[in-house]
Structure formats: C-alpha cells, structure tokens
Image (spheres, rainbow, N blue to C red):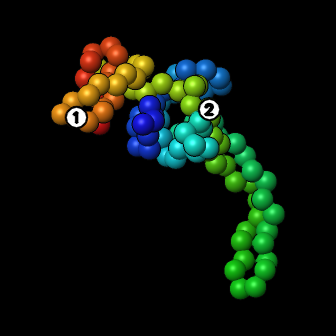
Amino acid sequence: MNRIKKGDTVEVITGEDNGVRGEVVRVLDNGTRVVVSKVNIVTKHQSAQRAGRSQMQGGRIQLEAPIHISNVMLVCPKCNQATRVGYAVVDERKVRVCRKCDAVIE
C-alpha cells in the first residue's frame, strides 16, 4: 500500500516549490515519484512533427515534471495539515491514518 495515491492533496516540503500544495496527477516508477499539478513546471522545447496526416505544432511546452515522493507530504483532509502517514487495521482492512489527528484517510 502506497502512502501517497493519485488524487491525494500533497504539500511540497523541499526545493524550489517549497510550501506549494497540489493534487497528485500520477504516481510513477513503482511508487517512487509523483507528478503534482501546478508544481515543478518545466519548459520542453518540442520540434514540429510533420509525418503523414497528423501535424503537431512545435514550440515551447510547459508541463509538470515528476518529483521524488520523499519531497512531498500528504495533507490530511480533516485537520488540513501536512502529516506523516500511519496505518491501522479497521474491519479487517488496512487503511491510512493521519499521524496528527488519527483520522482515517480515504
């Protein structure tokens, strides 16, 4: 079970975007990297593609680059604070738990 999943709200804790919150768009590389919306924006220089009928315009494209999962913290929906994630067994099911307010996250 991953500590951070797609759709979670996370806060960046290190780097250029320190303190910025966003939603997880994708989890990559077997759970080690995440793509967060509006965080770690990079500019990709893309050349025009003119193969066959499909033509793609070239230029500079801005997109979100992946961040290592250790550089983000999950934001608890109940207490609205960045928190570590714990686990508990509820009704024979393993669930994520906020370490600050002991609320079940899901």
Q: Which mark is residue 33?
A: none
Say which quarter of the image contains residue 33.
top right
Question: At 79% from the left edge and 77% from the top edge, which residue is drawn?
Answer: 50
Of callouts 2 and 1, the N-terminal one? 2
Spatial CA distance of label 2 from label 1 is 31 Å
- Percent x, y of residue 102: 26, 18
- Percent x, y of residue 14: 61, 20
Q: Name the residue under label 1.
A: 92
User: Which amino acid type corresponds to the residue marked 1 in the rendered image?
Assistant: Glu
Q: Is residue 21 left or right of residue 53?
A: left
Question: At 40% from the left edge and 19% from the top edge, which residue is drawn?
Answer: 83
Q: Mark 2 points at which residue?
A: 68
User: Which amino acid type corresponds to the residue marked 2 in the rendered image?
Assistant: His
* Most foreground residue, 94 or 105: 94
Q: In which quadrant will I find the C terminus?
A: top left
Observer-side mark, 2 or 1, equals 1
Q: Is residue 71 left or right of residue 91?
A: right
Question: At 30% from the left edge and 33% from the top edge, which residue is drawn?
Answer: 94
Numbered disc 2: secondary structure: strand
